[in-house]
Image (cartoon, rainbow, N blue to C red):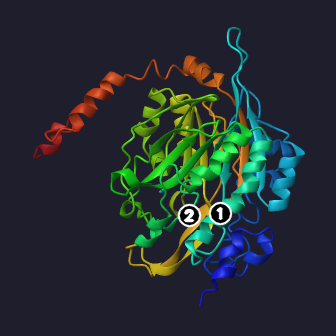
């Protein structure tokens, strides 16, 4: 019999490490042989909450420096610098037990343009109550949990803040149960109203990724990111373009493929776009935001370790390089347990959890450098300064836009979408010869 409450809280409490070891659904196993890998019940990486921290603590400083150069790159020829945040922000992180990290991307000094430095914040969080709690209480508890993290971002002078995908609810789309649709809200609903106050208070643009119910169009449900302007106004929305059909991500049961194209939102702090979660596997999706002039693309996500952890550090970083913009990747954290077992259609036993949402939010720059990741098992706020001049500097350097041959690709795509398309394959004639 599963003890919901004790399991549930294991990644949300400050005393995480002590309380987790007995977690049933964490499938703890201890390797019999001395050097066998160990899966840690607290969802840490061998007791560390990020790969970066594991390496830093275990490598000699000069080895760590070289490993970092290769893993996270150099920004303007140097290792990424950290930023000192106000005491009020660090106090909030200590009191509320969330990871807080801050970095700074520089660009080269230009003679004709002033630097355009923007401070970006990303919040990753676990849910706050068991999924068995009343829906009203679950949502309220998440709001309460986020308040100190948003305050920490605001008091640190963050200009643009992004929350994780569907942050206002458990990621219940694994269950295929329709009752979770109740969490859907209109664009100007409860979550937007909650965040508008912070946007106004801190002069901060906030990206609010929710489950949206379009009440003007027959209650259709979408996975939507709403952009709230720094005056508390709603600038616009983007609906998730690509809906996963993989593993337990049964999201097509709940909402439709987006119909908003690839909008770029021009804000006081820069041109931003949102590529929601699974859209990060689609290079053309990234490209389209770039063609519309995005300088920062946010990727609010909810993804689990077994499915995607090895590709998480690659795809967004590659998109930043290929499209000469910054990418800010946010992933949900924690393990969410649902009341009724569900199967994955793979012949394996039914289960009640989606797997571990591994957090690890990070930011990638167009020059191939990136920040270390936030924690794998704790809530977190990542704050990063970025000089947007770096985007054009990288365009001038690599000339990816100038060498892109878009007309060639337009041609093959135009053919490909036609029913009579035939792949351009030139076969070796000897393949069909009888010797
Ligand atoms: N939320 C979502 O689209 N998840 C899909 C899984 C993944 O893309 O890693």
Q: Is residue 365 above or below residue 166?
A: above
**Quadrant for the N terminus in the image:** bottom right
Label 2 sits on a secondary structure element that is loop
Residue placed most toward the observer, 290 or 136 = 136
Percent position of residue 200, x then y: 68, 40
Q: Quadrant of residue 44?
A: bottom right
CA gap, disc 2 and disc 1: 8 Å
Residue visible at 37% across and 73% down in the picture? 345
Is 414 left, or right, of 95 in this rendering? left
Percent position of residue 238, x then y: 46, 42
- Label 2 neighbourhood size at 10 Å, few (<14), some (14-19), many (20+)? many
What residue is disc 1 on?
142
Residue placed most toward the observer, 212 or 119 = 212
Q: Name the residue furthest bottom.
A: 1
Percent position of residue 85, x then y: 84, 42
Is 344 left, or right, of 139 in this rendering? left
Mark 2 or mark 1, earlier in chain? 1
Residue placed most toward the observer, 194 or 381 = 194
Percent position of residue 73, x then y: 68, 36
* Dot label at residue 201: none
Q: Is residue 108 above or below residue 137?
A: above
What residue is disc 2 on?
169
Q: Is mark 1 within 8 Å of ligand 1?
A: no
């Amino acid at each position: 019999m599963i003890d919901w409450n004790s399991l549930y809280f294991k990644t949300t409490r400050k005393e995480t490490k002590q309380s987790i070891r007995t977690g049933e659904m964490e499938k703890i196993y201890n390797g019999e042989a001395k050097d066998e890998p160990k899966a840690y019940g607290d969802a840490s990486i061998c007791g560390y909450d990020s790969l970066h921290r594991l390496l830093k603590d275990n490598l000699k400083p000069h080895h760590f420096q070289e490993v970092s150069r290769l893993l996270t790159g150099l920004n303007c020829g140097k290792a990424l610098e950290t930023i000192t945040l106000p005491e009020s922000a660090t106090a909030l992180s200590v009191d509320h037990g969330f990871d807080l990290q801050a970095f700074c991307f520089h660009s080269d000094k230009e003679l004709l343009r002033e630097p355009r430095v923007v401070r970006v914040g990303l919040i990753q969080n676990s849910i706050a109550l068991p999924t068995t709690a009343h829906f009203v209480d679950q949502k309220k508890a998440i709001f309460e949990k986020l308040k100190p993290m948003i305050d920490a971002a605001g008091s640190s002078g963050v200009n643009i803040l992004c929350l994780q995908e569907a942050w206002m609810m458990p990621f219940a789309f694994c269950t295929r149960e329709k009752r979770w649709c109740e969490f859907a809200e209109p664009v100007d609903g409860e979550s937007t109203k909650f965040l508008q106050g912070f946007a106004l208070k801190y002069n901060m643009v906030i990206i609010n990724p929710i489950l949206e119910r379009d009440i003007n169009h027959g209650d259709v449900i979408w996975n939507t990111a709403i952009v709230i302007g720094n005056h508390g106004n709603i600038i616009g929305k983007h609906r998730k373009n690509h809906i996963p059909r993989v593993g337990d991500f049964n999201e097509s049961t709940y909402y439709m493929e987006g119909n908003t194209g690839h909008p770029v939102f021009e804000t006081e702090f820069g041109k931003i776009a949102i590529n929601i979660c699974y859209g990060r596997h689609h290079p053309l999706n990234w490209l389209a935001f770039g063609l519309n002039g995005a300088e920062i693309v946010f990727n609010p996500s909810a993804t689990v370790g077994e499915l995607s952890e090895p590709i998480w550090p690659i795809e967004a970083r590659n998109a930043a390089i290929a499209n000469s913009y910054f990418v800010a990747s946010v992933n949900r954290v924690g393990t969410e347990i649902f009341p009724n077992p569900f199967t994955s259609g793979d012949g394996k036993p039914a289960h009640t959890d989606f797997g571990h949402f591994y957090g690890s939010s990070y930011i990638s720059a167009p020059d191939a450098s990136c920040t270390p990741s936030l924690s794998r098992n704790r809530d977190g706020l990542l704050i990063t300064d970025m000089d947007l001049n770096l985007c054009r500097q990288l365009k001038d350097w690599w000339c990816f836009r100038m060498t892109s041959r878009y007309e060639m690709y337009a041609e093959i795509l135009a053919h490909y979408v036609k029913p009579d398309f035939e792949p351009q394959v030139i076969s070796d004639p000897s393949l069909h010869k009888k010797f």
